[in-house]
Amino acid sequence: MISNTPDHTNIITIERHIFETQLYHPEATGVLTNILYDIALAGKVIASKTTRAGLAEILGRTEQVNVQDEVVMKLDDLANNTIYHLNIHSGRLAAMASEEDPEVMPIPDRYPTGKYILLYDPLDGSSNIDFNIPIGTIFAVYRRVTPEGPGQLVDCLQPGRNMVAAGYIIYGSSTMLVYTTGHGVHGFTLDPSVGEFLLSHPNITIPTSPKYFSVNLGYEMYWSKGVQKYTSYLQGEEGGIHGLSLRYVGSLVADFHRNLLAGGVFYYPADRKDPQKPHGKLRLLYEANPLAFLAEQAGGGASDGVTPILDIKPQSLHQRTPLFIGNKDLVDKAADYINQYDRQLEAVPA
C-alpha cells in the first residue's frame, strides 16, 4: 500500500511542468518540450561550475575577444560550449546563435536538423563573475522559417512576436529557471540534493505597485533630455512617483528577476558616452527579446523608448537596442517622456 504521507503530490518538476504545458498545443510533437529540458540540463551543468568557480580555476579572463569586442571570461566560454554541445546532436534544432559568436552556428553535417532555432546569451553579467554577483543564461526559441536543411541567418532574424519560448536561468544564492511558452511565466528552483528544478514560483505576474527602478545613474549625463526627465519622474520629481527605491546590480538577469517578482522598471537607454554604440548596449536577439516576451507574459511591457521590443524587425545578428522593461505603466511613461522631449528620436537599426 502506498502511503499518502509525506504528501509529495504538489511537487512539480520542470520536466512534468513542461510536458503539461505542451497539452495546450494538441498538435505538439514534444520537440519543444525536449529543447526546454535540454536547456534546463545545460543550466544544471553551468550551475555546478559557477558554484565551484573559485576552486575549479575557471575564474578570470581568457585571451579571447568576442564579437561584442569584449574580453571573454572563462565561465562565459564554458557556458557557451555547454549549451552548444548539449543541443547539436538532438535533431531538434536547425541552427543556434550566441552572443559570443559572430555568425550563425550551424548544426554539424553528421547530425540531423530540426524545425527550431535557439538564440542565447550563455552568461549574462559575466563581468561580475569574479565578484560573486548573480549572473545568468538567457534563451529564446523560434520556429525556423526556411523549409529544410541547415538553418540560415533569416531564421534568426525574426521579430520577437514569433518566439515560441523564452526564459533565463539565474545563478545566485540559489539557481532558478524562469520560462514561458506563451501561457504565463513560471519559476523553478534547483534542489541540489536531488539535482532537479522544482516549481517554486507558478504563474508569476509583475506586482501592480512597483518597488524599484534599476538603472546606472553614473551615465545620466550622457542621456537624452527625455530620459533624464523620466529619471526625475521615477525619483519623485516632475510630479512623479514617490517611494521607488533605486536598485542596480549591473547584471541584467539579476535586475530583471528582482523587478519581475517585486515590481519596477529596468532601463538601459542609448547614451552619448560611446559613439560606437549610439543605439544602446543590450543585444536585441539575446537579451531584450526573450526578456520582453517574459515581461509581457507576466503582465508587463518592454520597449526601446519608441517601439515595443517584440515588434522590432532585427536587421543584424548582434543588433543593439535601448531597453525599458518592467511594469507596463512605467514603460509607457518612458515613451511619453521620450516622445515629449526627444521628438527627433527614431528607432534606427544598429
Image (tube, rainbow, N blue to C red):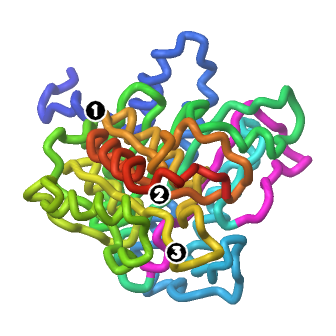
> Residue 44 got which mark?
2
> Which residue was labeled with disc 3?
272
Q: Nearer the viewer, residue 205 or 47?
A: 205
Where residue 18 appears, as percent x and y from the top left, is 45, 31
Q: Quadrant of the N terminus?
A: top left
User: How far is the residue under mark 1 from the one under mark 3?
Assistant: 39 Å
* Element class at badge 2: helix
Q: Is residue 11 above or below residue 102?
A: above
Judge from the rendering whether residue 87 lies leftward or rightward of residue 236; answer left or right.
Answer: right
- The mark that comes first in sequence, 1 or 2, is 2
The kind of residue tagged 1 is Asn
CA–CA distance in space, label 1 to label 2 = 22 Å
Q: Residue 83: where, in percent of width, then height?
A: 62, 57
Does residue 137 appear left or right of residue 229 in this picture?
A: right
Name the outermost residue toward the left: 243
Q: Is residue 259 magenta?
A: no
Q: Which mark is residue 203?
A: 1
Q: Which residues are magenta?
A: 101-129
SS class, disc 3: loop
